[in-house]
C-alpha cells in the first residue's frame, strides 16, 4: 500500500546526477571554509606578535627645534623640524627611537 510510483530509468539517472553534483558542491564548500579557517588561525597565532608593543618613549630634539611634521614608514619615524631658520628631517628607528640619520636642506 505504498503511494510511491516507480521511476523510469532515465529519471533515476537524472536524480543520481543531481545528488552527485550536490555532493561535489558540498565537499568544495567545506574545503573552502576549512582553508579560510586555516589562514585566519595562522595569522592570529603566527603574525599577531610581530607588532611592536606601545611604550612611552621620548625623543631628544636639538635645542630650539620646532617640529613641523612627522611621518612613519618602513620601520622609521621621520620628524621634520625647523632649526635656526633651516629645515631638517631627523630619522629614527621606530622600535627603539635611536637616531638613524639627518637630512639638512640648504639653498645653493
Image (cartoon, rainbow, N blue to C red):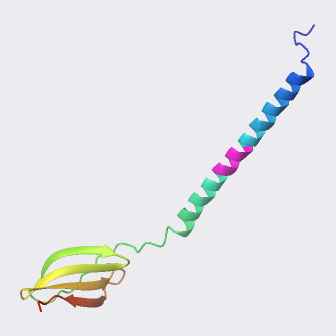
- The residue lying furthest to the left in this view is 85
Residue 103: image quadrant is: bottom left
- x and y percentages locating residue 29 in the rendered image: 67, 45
Q: Is residue 67 magenta?
A: no
- x and y percentages locating residue 82 in the rendered image: 11, 83
Q: Most prominent secondary structure in the magenta stretch? A: helix
Q: Is residue 60 left or right of residue 12?
A: left
- x and y percentages locating residue 79 in the rendered image: 22, 80
Q: Nearer the viewer, residue 107 or 6?
A: 107
Q: Is residue 17 left or right of residue 9?
A: left
- Residue drawn where x is 33% and y is 80% of the image: 76
The quadrant of the image that shows the C terminus is: bottom left
Q: Is residue 31 magenta?
A: yes
- Residue drawn where x is 26% and y is 79% of the image: 78
Q: Nearer the viewer, residue 82 or 52?
A: 82
Question: Which portion, as a residue range, is magenta?
Answer: 27-33
Check the image and report above or below for 77 versus 42.
Answer: below
- Residue drawn where x is 91% and y is 19% of the image: 8
Residue 106: image quadrant is: bottom left
- x and y percentages locating residue 55 in the rendered image: 33, 75
Check the image and report above or below for 67 versus 35.
Answer: below
Q: Is residue 40 left or right of residue 2?
A: left
**Residue 65 can be seen in this image:** no
**Residue 101 can be seen in this image:** yes
The quadrant of the image that shows the N terminus is: top right
- The residue lying furthest to the bottom in this view is 108
- Residue drawn where x is 15% and y is 89% of the image: 62
Amino acid at each position: 500500500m505504498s503511494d510511491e510510483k516507480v521511476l523510469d530509468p532515465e529519471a533515476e539517472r537524472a536524480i543520481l546526477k543531481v545528488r552527485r553534483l550536490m555532493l561535489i558542491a558540498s565537499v568544495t564548500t567545506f574545503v573552502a571554509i576549512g582553508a579560510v579557517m586555516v589562514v585566519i588561525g595562522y595569522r592570529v597565532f603566527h603574525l599577531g606578535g610581530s607588532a611592536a608593543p606601545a611604550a612611552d618613549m621620548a625623543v631628544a630634539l636639538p635645542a630650539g627645534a620646532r617640529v613641523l611634521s612627522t611621518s612613519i614608514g618602513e620601520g622609521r619615524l621621520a620628524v621634520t623640524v625647523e632649526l635656526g631658520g633651516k629645515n631638517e628631517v631627523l630619522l629614527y628607528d621606530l622600535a627603539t627611537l635611536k637616531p638613524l640619520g639627518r637630512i639638512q636642506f640648504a639653498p645653493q
